[in-house]
């Protein structure tokens, strides 16, 4: 059997800074032009110092009917790969061939216009995703029923609730019928019930024999959907094989890199980067550094950060998400939920998040710190640090949590009442 | 990204309950008789490549839907909707007739000034609004460019297509004015068809080029309204081209809008055509269109990374 997708040494180079507000003004171009000969002299052949390979020599093959997961940390090159295969951006080097019609879902609801009605948006979005009018006509009722928006189909979508909006957007996408589907984390939408429905639909797609490339953060979804997985790191493929095996390698890598608490060198982070976390560690309630948390005991998560300039940080939002070893979020502690005042922080300091009674059983967890300043994400590192938790007397009865239940979900304080 | 919490907890809570035996199994091999030639080849493009017309044809419905969206949204968001299309040239005509026609006594080749001005403003408004909306179209549709593939040319083309509809609507007013002033239609009005085609192609050529430049250099978008305003005064919109001294005409006629607008009037009012100016307009239009098609192709590969 011949591959339906064949990728050979695909590479993509970005100029550093091109991913931010990269457009230039004419003035930049003119001054750049005047300076260019000088620059070239000065750099003396080291012209590559300002570029970064988002993807480097990636080669793989996908066979018809396969569902392949692409995993890796933030910045590993997953999205770049998908964008190249979707023809949104061109590779710098390499070659790929695709034997079939491609539908790509890098987000749901691309091109939705708030002023247009649900009906109009179905046609518009369908056309943008590559469906013909005939195809949309044929599937229209099915799409509306799947999205459960029958009553509001002639209402402008600006009046929709965000749930309805996402349901409609996904419903259109889910009814694409290309031979090859490229999907990027679009399932992170809506309520849990609808997510299940979407994953079910994705499963159907796979069973129909269509080929799917699925980029995912949620390891449970990847392992459910994909028969094979590809692990990317820093733009290169570092492992490829059966999903379970690749997922455990991925989690291992996260764990080993999290052991070093020096965050300054971590590159797998998102955000603008003008303020960065430099270190994460734990303390007990007396302020002594500790290696691990204890169930039911206080735990203080300390985040050290530093800003590139000396200005105070106005209107900050800090959060710490705790993931289990499968990459599922267990809970999220956010300053927005606990503090009503506007938070202003010094350019360099420590932030402490105090959890009075740690609701985790004995296992390993991952900590993901997040910092937003004035509504813009400055830094966000997934799996920045491992949190080891040992069993403690969470329930105050001297009894420990049963071994088979450890590491699954969180502990909830509760009591039982019995009638005599 | 509106909320960090949403971002972090947006991961799925629970995956669908698929058991392992339901896992993906490729169907029998015969089901996939793959063609020998790949449907899509992805590799870095080199040098100057022309526009892929086959690809463009495959996406023709998208051109229709984007045009339809632009029109729908434009008319929906305003209180008087479609009436704006007529109001704009009509109000301008009124003002210019009072100030230029009556007070400054600008000559109008013996045609009532109001009709003369409207007949100039009609093609001019079509061209300038086409250039303005197509010039800003790629930047304005950045959310599409970064998320989905389609031939990028469709975006500026849809912007021009929407203005054709506007033109058709305001043309009905011209028909009414011709009737009111008792000007009768003649066979030379047939020239309107090739003239409009040329004007559309010129709008497309310049619009495509500006839209692509605008992605890289945002100054272009800021300079565009100024350029459009100045351009109106060096085109025979509010005055006849005959007002320009013959010695200047050599340079003046290089503006392709001179040949197009002047002959647009000639076609309506049965006046002699200026073939020399028309030849220049035609040559410039096609040169511009071909250059833009190549330049656009060369710049479009960076759109998604830069916009």
Image: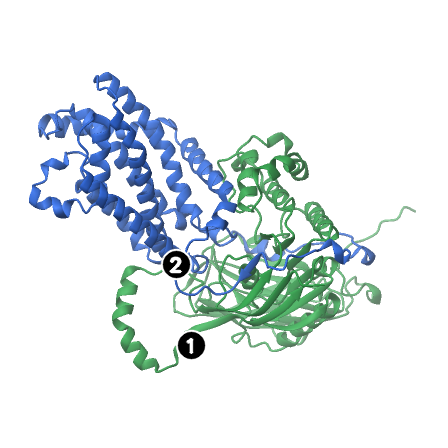
Could you say which chain is coloured green in the image?
A
Q: Residues within 10 Å of mark 2 (few under 14, many from 20)?
A: some
Where does residue B139 sit, x and y in percent of width and height? 40, 50
Please tell me whether mark 2 or mark 1 is closer to you in this view: 2
Q: Residue at x 31, y 81 (%)?
A: A42
B216 vs B85: above or below: below
Where does residue B283 sit, x and y in percent of width and height? 26, 47
Q: Distance between the Cα atoms at labels 2 and 1?
A: 22 Å
Q: Residues within 10 Å of mark 1 (few under 14, many from 20)?
A: few
Q: Residue at label 1?
A: A48
- Chain under disc 1: A
Numbered tag placed on residue B299 in the rendering:
2
Where does residue A277 sit, x and y in percent of width and height? 52, 70
Q: Residue at x 35, y 45 (%)?
A: B204
Of residues B33 and B180, the one drawn nearer to the viewer in this rendering: B33
Dot 2 falls on a residue whose secondary structure is helix
B206 vs A8: above or below: above
- Chain B painted colour: blue
Residue A182 visible (yes or no): yes
User: Do the residues under discs 2 and 1 have CB atoms within 8 angstroms?
Assistant: no
User: In the rendered image, which quarter contains the N terminus of chain A?
Assistant: bottom right
């Amino acid at each position: 059997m011949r591959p339906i997708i064949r990728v050979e040494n695909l590479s993509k180079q970005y100029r550093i800074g091109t991913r931010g507000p990269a457009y230039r003004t004419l003035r930049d171009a003119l001054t750049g032009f005047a300076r260019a000969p000088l620059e070239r002299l000065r750099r003396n052949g080291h012209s590559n110092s300002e570029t970064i390979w988002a993807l480097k020599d990636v080669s793989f093959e996908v066979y018809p009917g396969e569902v392949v997961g692409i995993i890796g940390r933030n910045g590993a090159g997953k999205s770049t790969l998908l964008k190249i295969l979707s023809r949104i951006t061109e590779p710098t080097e390499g070659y790929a061939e695709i034997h079939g019609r491609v539908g790509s879902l890098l987000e749901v609801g691309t091109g939705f216009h708030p002023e247009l009605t649900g009906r109009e948006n179905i046609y518009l979005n369908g056309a943008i995703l590559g469906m013909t009018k005939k195809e949309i006509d044929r599937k229209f009722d099915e799409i509306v029923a799947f999205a459960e928006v029958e009553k509001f189909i002639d209402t402008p979508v600006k009046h929709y609730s965000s749930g309805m909006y996402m349901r409609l957007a996904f419903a259109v996408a889910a009814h694409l019928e290309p031979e090859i589907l490229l999907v990027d984390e679009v399932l992170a939408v809506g309520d849990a019930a609808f997510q299940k429905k979407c994953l079910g639909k994705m499963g159907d797609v796979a069973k129909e024999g269509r080929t799917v490339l699925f980029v995912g953060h949620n390891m449970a979804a990847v392992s459910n959907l994909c028969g094979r997985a590809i692990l990317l790191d820093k733009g290169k493929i570092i492992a490829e094989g059966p999903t379970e095996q690749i997922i455990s390698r991925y989690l291992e890598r996260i764990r080993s890199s999290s052991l070093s608490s020096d965050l300054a060198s971590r590159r797998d982070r998102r955000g603008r980067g003008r303020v960065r976390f430099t270190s994460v560690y734990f303390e007990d309630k007396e302020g002594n550094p500790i290696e691990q948390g204890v169930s039911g005991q206080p735990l203080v998560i300390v985040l050290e950060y530093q800003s590139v300039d000396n200005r105070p940080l106005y209107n900050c939002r800090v959060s710490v998400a705790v993931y289990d070893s499968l990459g599922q979020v267990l809970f999220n502690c956010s300053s927005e939920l606990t503090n009503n005042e506007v938070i202003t922080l010094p350019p360099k300091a420590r932030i402490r998040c105090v959890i009075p009674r740690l609701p985790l059983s004995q296992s390993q967890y991952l900590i993901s710190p997040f910092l937003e300043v004035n509504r813009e994400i400055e830094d966000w590192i997934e799996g920045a640090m491992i949190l080891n938790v040992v069993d403690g007397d969470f329930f105050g009865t001297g009894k420990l949590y049963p071994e088979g239940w450890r590491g699954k979900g969180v502990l909830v304080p509760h009591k039982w009442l019995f009638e005599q | 990204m509106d909320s960090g919490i949403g971002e972090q907890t947006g991961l799925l809570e629970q995956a669908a309950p698929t058991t392992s035996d339901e896992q993906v199994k490729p169907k029998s091999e015969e089901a996939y008789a793959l063609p020998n030639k790949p449907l899509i080849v992805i590799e870095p493009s080199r040098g100057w490549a022309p526009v892929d017309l086959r690809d463009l044809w495959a996406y023709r419905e998208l051109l229709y839907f984007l045009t339809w969206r632009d029109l729908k949204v434009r008319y929906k968001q305003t209180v008087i909707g479609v009436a704006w299309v007529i109001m704009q040239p009509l109000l301008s005509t009124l003002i210019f007739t009072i100030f230029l026609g009556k007070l400054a006594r600008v000559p109008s080749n013996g045609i009532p000034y109001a009709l003369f001005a409207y007949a100039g403003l009609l093609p001019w408004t079509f061209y300038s609004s086409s250039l303005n909306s197509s010039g800003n179209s790629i930047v304005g549709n950045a959310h599409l460019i970064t998320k989905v593939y389609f031939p990028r040319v469709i975006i500026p083309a849809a912007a021009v297509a929407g203005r054709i509809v506007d033109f058709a609507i305001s043309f009905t007013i011209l028909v009414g004015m011709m009737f009111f002033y008792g000007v009768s239609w003649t066979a030379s009005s047939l020239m309107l068809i090739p003239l409009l085609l040329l004007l559309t192609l010129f709008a497309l050529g310049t619009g495509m080029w500006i839209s692509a430049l605008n992605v890289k250099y945002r100054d272009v978008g800021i300079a565009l309204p100024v350029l459009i305003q100045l351009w109106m005064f060096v085109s025979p919109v509010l005055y006849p081209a005959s007002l320009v001294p013959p010695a200047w005409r050599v340079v003046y006629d290089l503006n392709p809008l001179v040949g197009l607008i002047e002959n647009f009037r000639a076609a309506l009012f049965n006046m002699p055509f200026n073939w020399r100016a028309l030849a220049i307009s035609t040559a410039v239009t096609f040169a511009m269109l071909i250059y833009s098609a190549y330049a656009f192709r060369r710049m479009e590969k960076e759109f998604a990374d830069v916009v």
